[in-house]
Image (cartoon, grey):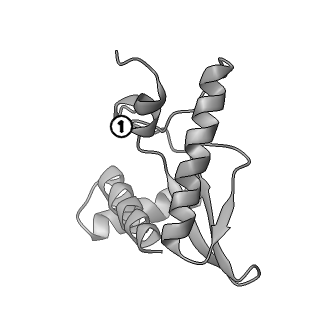
Amino acid sequence: MAKKNLDYYLNLPYTYVIEWSDVDECFLGSIAELEHNMTCGQTHEEVFRNLKEALISYITTSLDNNFEIPEPLKVTDFKGSITYRTSRERHYKLAKQAKLYGKSINAFIDEAIGEKLQAAARG
């Protein structure tokens, strides 16, 4: 296992969220895995630099004080199975649609989720 030092944490795939704010008239950014963090700037690049600096400061302070540092989710943390509960009516509708498309309910749900995730990634 790698030593958990500054370099270890900086090489993890943290989730940077940067969006334009009409209210603030600037880009706002945060790191999803860290609570209570936000910065702003006039460009994506400025906000990203600010977030990187804040992450370095957060990690350094946490290491110096032996605080727990949140890490991003890893693909290996998941098995690929989800227990999903829904109403009878929605289950029925899913079964009908899946059959119409010649798919199992699981395949139909997985495809629908994949489409929604792609749309969300595009913004």
Q: Is residue 105 above or below residue 79?
A: below
Q: Pinpoint residue 38: horizontal percent, then vertical percent.
A: 69, 57
Q: Is residue 39 above or below residue 69?
A: below
Q: Exactly how many numbered labels are in the figure?
A: 1
In front of the other: 36 or 62: 62
In front of the other: 68 or 41: 41
User: In this view of the protein, can residue 40 be seen by the observer?
Assistant: yes
Amino acid under label 1?
Val
Q: Residue furthest left?
A: 102
Q: Pinpoint residue 54: horizontal percent, then vertical percent.
A: 61, 48
Q: Residue furthest right?
A: 23
Q: Pinpoint residue 37: horizontal percent, then vertical percent.
A: 69, 51
Q: Which residue is mark 1?
A: 75
Quarter that holds the N terminus: top left
Q: Pinpoint residue 115: horizontal percent, then vertical percent.
A: 37, 68
Residue at image location 63% in from the left, 43% down from the top: 34
